[in-house]
Image (spheres, grey):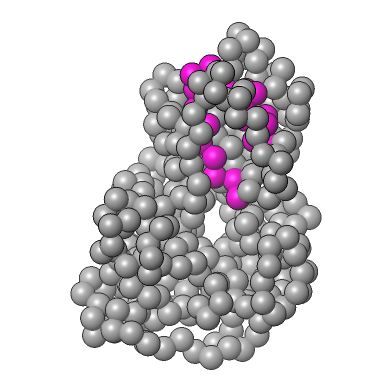
Amino acid sequence: MRATVIHAPHDIRVQEVPDPTIQQPTDVVLRVLRACICGSDLWAYRGESARQPGQRIGHEFLGIVEEAGSGVAGFAVGDLVVAPFVWSDGTCEYCAEGLMTSCPQGGFWGSVGSDGGQGEAVRVPFADGTLVKLPAAAASDDRLLTALLALSDVLGTGHHAAVGAGVRPGSTVAVVGDGAVGLCGVMAAKRLGAERIIALGRHQVRTDIARRFGATDVVAERGEAAVAAVRELTGGAGAHAVIEAVGTEQSMRTAVEITRDGGSIGYVGVPHGSGTGLDLGVMFDRNIALRGGVAPVRAYIPELLPDVLSGTIDPSPVFDLTIGLDEVPAGYRAMDERTALKVLIKP
């Protein structure tokens, strides 16, 4: 089969690799219908996170079950399914608590020795604990299929940030970051009943999507100017809940400074360039809570899926460029150069 492989920074290739096979009774082999490029993939692409030459890449995909191991009970050949970005056994204490990202037998797609999502097929370990079945009819609905793909990562990650930030009906929310996760954070905040949602972002195409998803205000400034703008919009107090979807030191400092005393920050931006940390004394003095981390999206899919199927929420606009598998290297360049927000792949 063909799959996306990273050899070195800025060296992404689509090449022939061995077809996936059933290795354990709990495996399935999945034919990929839709995949995409994540903003976090760019850290490997830019050389900011280590990868072995020849390692697979990609962790967001959905598709059709082509083969199922003898121990798989919940899926059959022909089922349409979505895969969260981490596989998990579904039986350990962490999985029972809804923290599938800490499953001792779990792992990330594209890790050494595993398939990545940006390919024609994937071996899925622990299928019963990992995959979620989708309505078969969705396979012929292109817009819906694209919206459902967001369940594999960005929609659940935005929701995780909103939950971590303590978004409640009537609350004021600020969202730091105008990438796909930040935009899904706007959508999640709206879904959870926020009355005012302030989106921080400088790119009009993206902030237009933020408004479409529920943002009531847009702040284009950065740094201290952004803090001043949010403070002015909130009568000097700041936001009850802040979603941090970037992961830099500056973005986290901005998040702290725009949080209302007694408020919370939900952080889901993958940390990079934030080694000097934060002044916990500031957070202590102002009673600011910090919650978040790697989103256990498998726990959120059952809650979010009905709203996507009904059209109550539609995250599909975050995908603004569609390519074939052979065009994946160009897709990485487009996201790296910020000429694309999130690239959809149709293998």
The residue that appears at 31% across and 57% down in the rendered structure is 95
- Residue 4 in the image: x percent, y percent? 62, 76
Q: Nearer the viewer, residue 248 or 45?
A: 248
- Kindly indicate the quadrant of the structure image that contains residue 45: bottom right
Q: Is residue 246 above or below residue 116?
A: above
In screen coordinates, is 23 left or right of 317? left
- Residue 178 in the image: x percent, y percent? 64, 40
Is 171 included in the stretch rendered in magenta? no
Bounds of the magenta segment: 251-270
- Residue 83 in the image: x percent, y percent? 41, 65
Whether residue 119 is visible, yes or no, is no
Residue placed farthest to the front in the image? 281
- Kindly indicate the quadrant of the structure image that contains residue 337: bottom right
Is 267 included in the stretch rendered in magenta? yes
Whether residue 238 is visible, yes or no, is yes
Q: Is residue 203 above or below residue 87?
A: above
The residue that appears at 59% across and 42% down in the rendered structure is 245
In screen coordinates, is 164 left or right of 41? left
The residue that appears at 63% across and 48% down in the rendered structure is 271
Classify the position of the N terminus by image quarter.
Answer: bottom right
In screen coordinates, is 6 left or right of 62? right
- Residue 76 in the image: x percent, y percent? 26, 77
Residue placed farthest to the top in the image? 235
